[in-house]
Amino acid sequence: MASELTVDLAKLETIFAQYGDQTGVLIPVLQAAQAEYGYLPSAVLSAIAERLAVPLSQVYGVVTFYSQFYLNPRGRHVIRCCDGTACHVRGTPKIVEALENHLGIRAGETTDDMAYTLEVVYCLGSCALAPVVVVDGTVMGGVTPERMLKVIASLDGADGAGAGA
């Protein structure tokens, strides 16, 4: 991947300096690195493993165990559709289908222009608001497919990003 070749590992120095020689800091270092890069490129994971003297396999084990970590770049806008029981019954599958058709991607993917990442999660803890969608950290309840397409249109207008289709 071309983006792997252009990763500036110097950005990690500030993170390493923050933790010094402390032990047991793998997760906070990974969190800080992801905040810096937007995801965790393999070169970053290798540098972290080397600097913390942790086997690379252990670093990957942690990253793949916790859903908060991402190994692939994410879009400028992240759409998380809840598909827990209440949301599913109240229409999440139709919302996801409308988003997939409009954006030209499947759930779990990012548009080619890096504008949108579409995720399905299995409970956001807001069942009374079902169906629930979180767009860029903003919780929206009682969502319909039509409303989601309007939200996407407003995001497109706000940053000039186009739908991935």
Image (cartoon, helix red, strand yellow):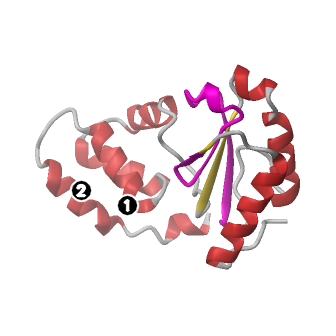
Q: Viewer-proximal residue, 161 or 144? A: 144
Q: Residue 50: image x %, image y %? A: 29, 47
Quadrant holding the N terminus: bottom right
Provide the residue designation for mark 2. 15
Q: Are marks 1 and 2 in contact (CB under 8 Å)?
A: yes
Task: Give the magenta-colored segment's residue range.
Answer: 113-139
Tell me if residue 130 comes above or below residue 70 in the rendering. above
Residue that protrudes farthest toward the bottom in the picture: 160
Q: Viewer-proximal residue, 86 or 26? A: 86
Q: Residue 51: image x %, image y %? A: 24, 49
Amino acid type at circle 1 is: Glu
Residue 137 part of the magenta-drawn span? yes
Q: Viewer-proximal residue, 86 or 11? A: 86
Callout 1: helix, strand or loop? Answer: helix
Quadrant holding the C terminus: bottom right
Q: Quadrant of residue 52?
A: top left
Q: Residue at x 62, y 76 (%)?
A: 159
Q: Residue at x 80, y 47 (%)?
A: 106
